[in-house]
Structure formats: C-alpha cells, structure tokens
Amino acid sequence: MAEIEFPAQQKQQLVQKLQKYMSDELEIELGQFDADFLLDFISKEMGKHYYNQGLYDAQTVLADRMDSLVEVIYQLEK
C-alpha cells in the first residue's frame, strides 16, 4: 500500500485542525512544523487502519447491495 499523502491545501487544513484541537482540548500550542510532523506520524502509523476499516465498510455495503440485487433478480424470474 502506498503511503497516505494529501494535496498541499488539504494537508494545511488538517495541520490547522490538529493545532486547534491540541490548543482547545489539551492546551498545547503546537507550531506549524511540529503539527506537520505529527500529522505525518498519524498518517503513517494509524492511517492504514482507518483506510482498511473504510475498505471493510465499503465491502459490507457492497455485499448488502448485491444481496438485494440477487433478490430482485429472483423476483423477475418467470
């Protein structure tokens, strides 16, 4: 799996959200440089778990839709 990378503008928004969270919730002032490295760490170490969960969720939705489709096809039988 390729590393998770964000376009520059999106990464900047994520860094700002991380800085705001750290400030509001933990009362820690996180500079731009540190926030950027923290985001990279989170993406590298935890991102794959969120990515995989998204795949599992999509697979479940797709399986449910396929079951519905099979049911509709059976109803069309003559």
Image: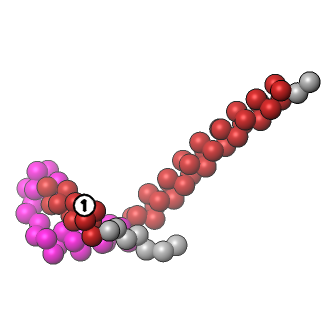
Judging depth in this view, the residue of 8 and 20 nearest the camera is 8
Q: Residue at x 43, y 74 (%)?
A: 3
Q: Residue at x 67, y 43 (%)?
A: 63
Q: Is disc 1 surrounded by few (<14), some (14 to 19) or many (20+) residues within 10 Å? A: some
Q: Is residue 24 magenta?
A: yes
Identify the magenta region.
Answer: 21-45
Q: Is residue 69 visible?
A: yes
Secondary structure of the magenta portion, mostly? helix
The quarter holding residue 69 reads: top right
Q: Is residue 18 visible?
A: no
Query: Looking at the picture, does residue 48 appear above or below residue 26?
Result: below
List the residue tagged with mark 1. 14
> Picture coordinates of residue 28 (x, y %)?
9, 61
Horizontal side, residue 37 vs residue 71: left or right: left
The quarter holding residue 38 reads: bottom left
Kind of residue at badge 1: Leu
Q: Is residue 77 magenta?
A: no
Judging depth in this view, the residue of 22 and 11 nearest the camera is 11
> Picture coordinates of residue 73 (x, y %)?
80, 32
Secondary element type, mark 1: helix
Q: Residue at x 49, y 53 (%)?
A: 54
Q: Residue at x 10, y 56 (%)?
A: 23
